[in-house]
Image: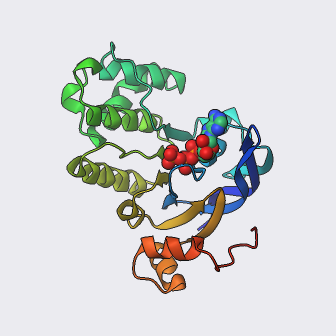
Amino acid sequence: MSDVVKIENIQHGYNKQTVLKDVNLAIPEGGLFGLLGPSGSGKTTLVKIIMGLLTPDSGRIKIAGDEMPSFKLMQKIGYMAQSDALYNELTARENMQFFATLYRIPKGEQTERIAEAAKIVNLSDVLDDTLETFSGGMKRRMSLAIALVHHPQLLILDEPTVGIDPVLRASIWEELRKVQQAGTTIIITTHVMDEAEKCDSLALLRDGYLIAHGSPDDLKAKSGTETLEAAFLYFGGAGHAHSGHR
Ligand SMILES: Nc1ncnc2c1ncn2[C@@H]1O[C@H](COP(=O)(O)OP(=O)(O)OP(=O)(O)O)[C@@H](O)[C@H]1O
């Protein structure tokens, strides 16, 4: 399996604080890849760099062999930010039309694409309601549908299930699996261990360092631990030499 994202020697800071410190990572095509790390560890910064929304201080990002940022590549990426960027006074359909047009989906194809994305996130019945009538969970699903409407090759989700109840979380994960099975590579950020368990492979970030990566089972085996939480503590812990950066 080839790598769809290659991250080479990424370093990035805000003001004088360095928040990503020489991050190297290859993300295989077709998988569900998790970036796991506590709040402030640099996950959002890294996904914004992957997306081309932020230019790193140094290092390179390649997606499907081409260097980011690239407008051509941005059209192949779906991104769901932590907070919903939606138009409350418009209907679900109008919100999706707006983004479908931005992504240059021909008018003739929009109706079908919108219906398809709404079906994946279970919003087909409320497509013509304004978002003012939507719950928080419905808005999150709306954001996911928007990230899917242009059939991205790569889908990047920044903590998509924060603030979402367990039942809805489970249904979002089911939807993500369907999208992945249809051929999309998914990158998800999370600080929730049970979500990390569901990923095919994981990168662990702590204080801007990539401290380990592998499948959840690999990480537990390599650290001799039984839970991802314990593995995280092992790799990030004092006395364990991670990449010799400290
Ligand atoms: N625009 C910015 N200006 C200054 N500092 C920033 C900016 N964005 C992020 N930071 C800082 O960079 C560090 C990493 O932030 P980042 O949002 O990437 O972490 P995160 O792992 O995504 O956290 P969370 O899980 O809380 O979203 C934090 O210390 C944060 O305060």
Provide residue 148's location: percent of width, then percent of height: 43, 39
Image height of 229 relative to 142, above or below: below
Residue extending farthest front: 238
Provide residue 41's location: percent of width, then percent of height: 58, 53
Provide residue 153's location: percent of width, then percent of height: 53, 47
User: Position of 132 compared to 22: left or right?
Assistant: left
Q: Name which quarter of the figure residue 199 lies in.
A: bottom left
Closer to the camera in the image, 200 or 192:
192
Provide residue 186's location: percent of width, then percent of height: 48, 53
Q: Residue at x 39, y 38 (%)?
A: 144
Residue 168 visible (yes or no):
yes
Q: Residue at x 77, y 50 (%)?
A: 60
Q: How many marks?
A: 0
Image height of 109 relative to 189, above or below: above
Q: Residue at x 57, y 40 (%)?
A: 76
Quadrant containing the C terminus in the rendered view: bottom right
User: Position of 57 compared to 77: left or right?
Assistant: right
Coloring applied to the structure: rainbow
**Quarter for ligand 1?**
top right
Residue 67 visible (yes or no):
no
Closer to the camera in the image, 184 or 147:
147
Closer to the camera in the image, 186 or 182:
186
Closer to the camera in the image, 121 or 53:
53
Quadrant containing the N terminus in the rendered view: bottom right
Residue extending farthest top: 89
Residue extending farthest right: 58
Image height of 196 relative to 44, above or below: below
Q: Residue at x 39, y 33 (%)?
A: 143
